[in-house]
Structures are given as structure tokens and as C-alpha cells.
Image (tube, grey):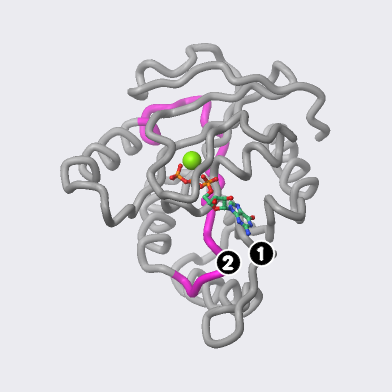
Amino acid sequence: SRVKEAEFVKSSARARDCPKDDRPEFAVLGRSNVGKSSLINALIRRKEAALTSKKPGKTQTINHFLVNKSWYLVDLPGYGFAAASQSAQTDWSSFTKGYFLNRDTLVGVLLLVDASIPPQKIDLDCANWLGRNNIGLTFVFTKCDKSKKGKGGRPEENIKEFQETISSLYPEPPPWIMTSSVTGLGRDGLLLHMSQLRNY
Ligand code: GTP
Ligand code: MG
């Protein structure tokens, strides 16, 4: 499950513009600013392969990164960005839904959830939508290095609360992993998990 090489391949504005080979891929999905692009950089050990920003809404296209010349990691725009216009939000859902429903080479979705804040309804809605469409997902809790005093400030507690809600929605709760793009927590475990999913 080691990353020997990785390269940016292309940015696509629409699902039908994505690479057309048969390599398996994992989509990285989650709210704007949850740390999708940062996670990809941490996984492939490149600082700025995927562009990141403090401001939400940085990634606006579908971005394919080829790992070990054999599989793709896909960086997607975030959802739930309140400042985005209604039409931008509508575009988001039609274009990413188009991608998820038509991408035959999709092995699974890494659904990123910010562990430094309490569970958000929009993440549960997203998990439900993927479940209803039989798209396999793994919860990747991000920002596990961030801890604040007070209610909703501790990653472990936020994750526990999220899991409890999920287990009431899913007969079999999806796999999950704790990560931090700052400390590298979870990196090797997540790479191993993806290598196992690719070989099923
Ligand atoms: P969009 O492209 O706008 O949807 O955002 P994104 O999900 O790609 O987030 P991005 O990777 O750009 O990160 C957003 C902010 O969170 C940046 O300021 C990152 O430095 C920060 N961040 C990302 N991951 C972590 C993490 O694990 N820990 C901490 N402390 N900060 C993180
Ligand atoms: Mg991004």
C-alpha cells in the first residue's frame, strides 16, 4: 500500500470529461474546508499537489491524481458552502451526482467529516444519499489534531456522537478512520484500507 509515485493528471469540469481508462478510483468528498485537498497531499506526500485554502470553495472541478500508475485519487469540490450562490449549489449537486451515478470505475468514496466540530446534518444527509445509491463509503474523520475546550471541541466525543447517529441509520455501519493532515495520523491505515478495497 506504499505510494511510490503520484502525479496530477487532469481537472475536469464535467463527469464526462474525466479520464477514460479502467483504473480504479476513490473519490474524496465532504463539506467545503473539511480538508479534502490537504488529505490528498498528505496521502501522496506533496505539499501543494492539490490546492488548499483557508477559505472554503477552493476546489471547483474534478481533479484526478494517479498513484503508482495504477489507481486514482479524486479531489472534488466541497458541499455546504453557505456563501455559494443558490445556482452554484445547484450546479454542485447536479455535477457531482452525475459523477457518482455514472463513474463505473469508482471503488469507493472517502466521506470526510470534520472531527473538530459536532456532527453536521449535511454530512449525514450525504452519507444517506450515498447509501441509498449503493455507493460504498468510508468515513474519514479529519482535523483530529484540533482540540478545543468546551462542548463540541473534542474530536473523540464528536466522532462518538457521529457514529451513534450513523449506526441508527445504517444496518451495517461503514468503516471509519481518524486522520490528521498535520500530524499524518491515519495516513498509512487509510492507504492500507484502500489497497484492500481495490483487491476485492
Ligand atoms: P474546498 O476545496 O474549499 O472544498 O476545501 P477542502 O476540503 O479541500 O479543504 P482544504 O484541504 O483546502 O483545507 C481547508 C483548511 O483546513 C486549510 O486551512 C487547511 O490547512 C486546514 N486543514 C486541513 N486538514 C487539516 C488537519 O488535518 N488539521 C488541521 N489542523 N487543519 C487542517
Ligand atoms: Mg479542496
Q: Is residue 169 left or right of residue 65?
A: left
Task: Indicate whether 121 appears above or below 4.
Answer: below
Disc 2: which residue: 115
For the C terminus, give its image quadrant.
Answer: top right
Task: Indicate whether 164 appears above or below 33.
Answer: below
Task: Indicate whether 59 appears above or below 153.
Answer: above
Name which residue type carries label 1: Cys
* Residue 58's disc number: none
Q: Do the residues labelled 2 and 1 touch (CB within 8 Å)?
A: yes
* Residue at 24% from the left image edge and 45% from the top image edge: 89
Disc 1: which residue: 144
| Label whose residue precedes the other's in the sequence (2 or 1) | 2
Q: Which residue is at the front of the view, 152 or 23?
A: 152
| Quarter where residue 149 is shown | bottom right
Q: As drawn, which residue projects farthest toward the left?
A: 87
Q: Where is residue 69 in the image (x, y as percent from the top left)?
A: 70, 16
Which range is magenta?
A: 99-119
Query: Can residue 156 be found in the magenta stretch?
Result: no
Q: Where is residue 194 in the image (x, y as percent from the top left)?
A: 69, 40
Name which residue type carries label 2: Ala
For label 1, being within 8 Å of ligand 1 is answered yes
Asked which secondary structure carries label 2, the reply is loop
Q: In this view, does 98 lie to the left or right of 118?
A: left
